[in-house]
Amino acid sequence: MTDDDAMDEQHTIWEDWAQADPLWAILSDPTRKGGRWELDEFFASGDHDVEEALRECAEHGLALARGRALDFGCGVGRLTQALASHFDHVDGVDISETMVRLANEHNRWPDRVQYHVNTTDDLGLLDDESFDFVLTVIVLQHNPPAVARRYIAEFVRILRPGGIAVFDLTSTLANVSLPAGAHQGALELLDAPSTLAPGESTIAKVRVTNTSGVDWPPASRLALGNHWLRGDGAMAVQDDGRTPLGDGLATQASTEAELTVTAPKAPNGYRLAVDLVEEGVTWFSGDGGALAERAVEVRRPRRFLRRGRDHDASASTPDHEPRPFEMNGVPREDVEATVAEAGAQVVVAIPSGRGGAHWDGFRYLVTKPR
């Protein structure tokens, strides 16, 4: 796949999510999937994240000019709006036109904040040495590694001398891999509903048995998860709930686990398909393991997505969930080399869990010499 193809793919995925569930796509709390973020709470989380980044800069002796700031991967403006309380002018950049439209709808600082759509793997729309501060949180890892490194170099290009960039980036998959031949298990749905409302969440109880013949070690990337299938077997939602099985499981042993599942948005008849997954490696069903399935009728449309006013998702959103956004890592040494080649320096790389439990990662504080 060429870089242009990769960017087209990213644009399609994020535009689809912007239309389906934009707030959850930006801040993926599993309890808020399906339009369950309250706008006030969502934007308040941006205040917290911006204050944390500014505090970290101060703690590491970085003096920050308060002229112009960039929120890269701005989405609907969660961080952009918070930055406007601290800087004279703030720009937000996102790959999705719908995200930018929603950001403008929620712009409380029209005299200080400007949003831009950017679908390229550079920031050519922004001038050299025009920003005092660049901030991006849980964004870069959703790009191919080469594209992420290119954006990092672009951050340095647009920084003024003495400017600071703060960005999060996953590095490598953490925890223990399952041994060869381990992707075999038996699942039994002990308790799951037969009827749900569109977008409703509930708990499914599942018995998991390790039938592989080898032990599943503790601290592996093993988890219980689920898909939603249409009546004809086509995928409606590829990746829904997750319950980590961090204690592992001896061969032929069983355990019971609870899995939070969220019904598709469109009323219809579906099959709830529960599976096991080694994160970043494979779903067990794709490696010969068996699914546990149950028919579920999704009934009764209801209000779904808040965009400053109630919005009936059934009128404008698709009956399937968009493809999952990809997850990648860039090793710390590669990030530091990219920053140095661009003419800046990493002041500190702070270990970070923002990429999720299965990834090691860092928050990088970067400064451009005067």
Image: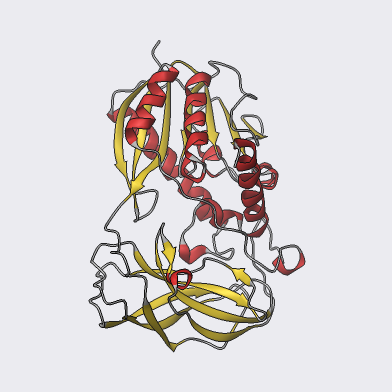
| Side of 311 where 258 appears, left or right | left
Which residue is located at x 50 percent, y 53 percent? 27
* Residue occupying image coordinates x 65% and y 59%: 20
Q: Is residue 84 visible?
A: no
The answer to whether one can see residue 22 in this image is yes
Q: Nearer the viewer, residue 286 or 176?
A: 286
Seen as rendered, the residue at the extreme top is 370
**Would residue 205 be found to the left or right of residue 147 on screen?**
left
Q: Position of residue 138 (x, y in %)?
A: 46, 45
Report the front residue among 242 and 29: 242
Q: Quadrant of residue 101?
A: top right
Residue drawn at 57 percent across, 40 percent down: 74
Q: Quadrant of the N terminus?
A: top right
Q: Residue at x 28, y 27 (%)?
A: 60
Q: Nearer the viewer, residue 145 or 344?
A: 145
| In the rendered image, the vertical position of residue 360 relative to residue 261, given as above or below | above
Give the percent coordinates (x, y) of residue 271.
58, 81
- 161 shown above or below 288: above
Total numbered labels: 0
Return the x and y of residue 216 as percentages of the image width and height: 26, 70
- 267, 110: nearer the viewer: 267
Residue 310, quarter of the rendered image:
bottom right
Q: Position of residue 2 (x, y in %)?
A: 61, 38
* Residue 245 found in image quarter: bottom left
Would residue 298 be found to the left or right of residue 273 on screen?
Answer: right
Q: Is residue 58 left or right of residue 88?
A: left
Residue reaching furthest to the right: 315
Q: For the C terminus, which image quadrant?
A: top left
Q: Is residue 13 above or below residue 251?
A: above
